[in-house]
Each structure stands twice: as C-alpha cells, then as structure tokens.
Image: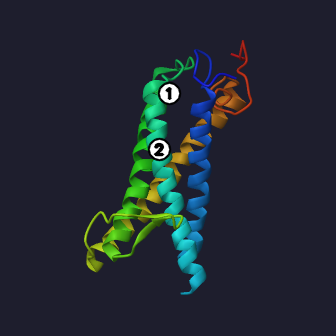
Amino acid sequence: MSLRSDKRQWGSIAKLFHWLVALGILVNGVWGLLMTDMSPSMSKISIYALHKSIGLTILALFFLRLAWRLYDRAPPDEPAPLWQRVAAHATHALLYGLILAMPLSGWWYNSLHGFPLQWFKLFNLPALAGKNEELAHTAHAIHEYLFYLLLLVLIAHVGAALKHHFFDKDNVLRRMLPFTRTRRNPSP
C-alpha cells in the first residue's frame, strides 16, 4: 500500500489521518457528553483535562492532515451524478470547517473561563481571550451547537459512504478503508 494517494485510492498517510481524526472525534464527543453530568470532583477535572487534550490533538492532526492534503492530491472522484459530487465536496468542506471550529471554540470557551489549558500535562497553551464569564456562556453554547452540527454532518457523511458501498457497490468507501484495495470493476 502506497503512502501517497494514487488514481484509484487514498494513500496510507491520508487514511491514517482520516481514521485518527474520526476516532478522536468519536471518543471526545462521547467524553464531552458524559462529563457534563458529573458531580464536581477530582475525576471530573481529570476528565475535562483529557477532553481538552484530545481536542487539541484533533486540532494538531487537522493541520497535519491539511498540510498532507495540500501535498498529496486527492484521487479523482468516483463516477457519480453531478449533484452527488457537489454534495460530497460541500460535505467535506463543512467537515473540515467543523473539525477546525470545534477545538478552537473549546479553547476559546476555556480561555473565557480563565482556566489554564494544558496538553496532556506536558505544556500550557496561551489563552485565546481574557476571562469573561458572561461571554463564556455564549462560547459554551457555540461549542455545543457546533458539536451537534458536526454530528449531523458526520451522519450524512457515513450514511453516504455506506450507501455507496452497499447499494451502489462502488469504491467510494473502499478507497478510504485501511488495508483494503479497490475493486477493478465495481458493480454498475
């Protein structure tokens, strides 16, 4: 399997970034939903710290993935009606925007609360804004709404991939699956 993408499928590096970000979003989304209902404790503080560190890791992976994407061009689109190709590109652009906005909005929210932001207790990051409790409530709402929007777009993304795989029987999903090769002649 090639590190770079070719005319038929995504390369190993692109696949690795895709699946690491997907796993990070899944883990951090569940973490985020569970931690808000916890009673105040040292465990809650540790879970919040882990949530923030994972979010920062997703942000770093996003920038690495973007840099790789600029270096390693995407394979050509699979044959599909124009509206599906436009919808796929729009969905990917929205996903990229949301994957960037989620950790930044969390960082902003954290800054407005005046909490220190550490990455896995290894180093501190600067605040994006000064402490402002009133604005922190707005930032929290934005962070939460962005998560639900990301969830909806991810459901559409995964649903479309599964539709292509099981109903259209084309290579759209197979091109991004690890350790999988595309079919030479997918079913029409």
Dot 2 or dot 1, earlier in sequence: 2
Tell me if 119 is positioned left or right of 162 in this view.
left
- Amino acid under label 2? Phe
Residue at left offset 62%, top offset 38%:
16
Q: Is residue 36 above or below residue 9?
A: below
Give residue 173's quadrant in the image: top right
Q: Is residue 139 above or below residue 59?
A: below
Image quadrant holding the C terminus, namely: top right
Residue at left offset 59%, top offset 72%:
34
- Amino acid under label 1? Gln
Q: Point out residue 149 in the picture as x, y percentages from the top left corner.
A: 45, 54
Q: Is residue 1 above or below residue 68?
A: above
Q: Nearer the viewer, mark 2 or mark 1?
A: 2
Image coloring type: rainbow
Q: Which residue is mark 1?
A: 84
User: Which residue ends up furthest to the top in the rendered image?
Assistant: 185
Q: Point out residue 159 in the picture as x, y percentages from the top left corner.
A: 61, 41
- Disc 2 from disc 1: Cα separation: 25 Å
Tell me if 101 is positioned left or right of 37 in this view.
left
Residue at left offset 52%, top offset 53%:
151
Image quadrant holding the N terminus, namely: top right
Q: Which residue is mark 2?
A: 62
Kindly tell me whether residue 38 is visible in this rendering: no
Question: Is disc 1 placed on a helix, strand or loop?
Answer: helix
Tell me if 100 is positioned left or right of 10 in this view.
left
Closer to us: 131 or 74: 131
User: Which residue ends up furthest to the bottom in the rendered image?
Assistant: 40
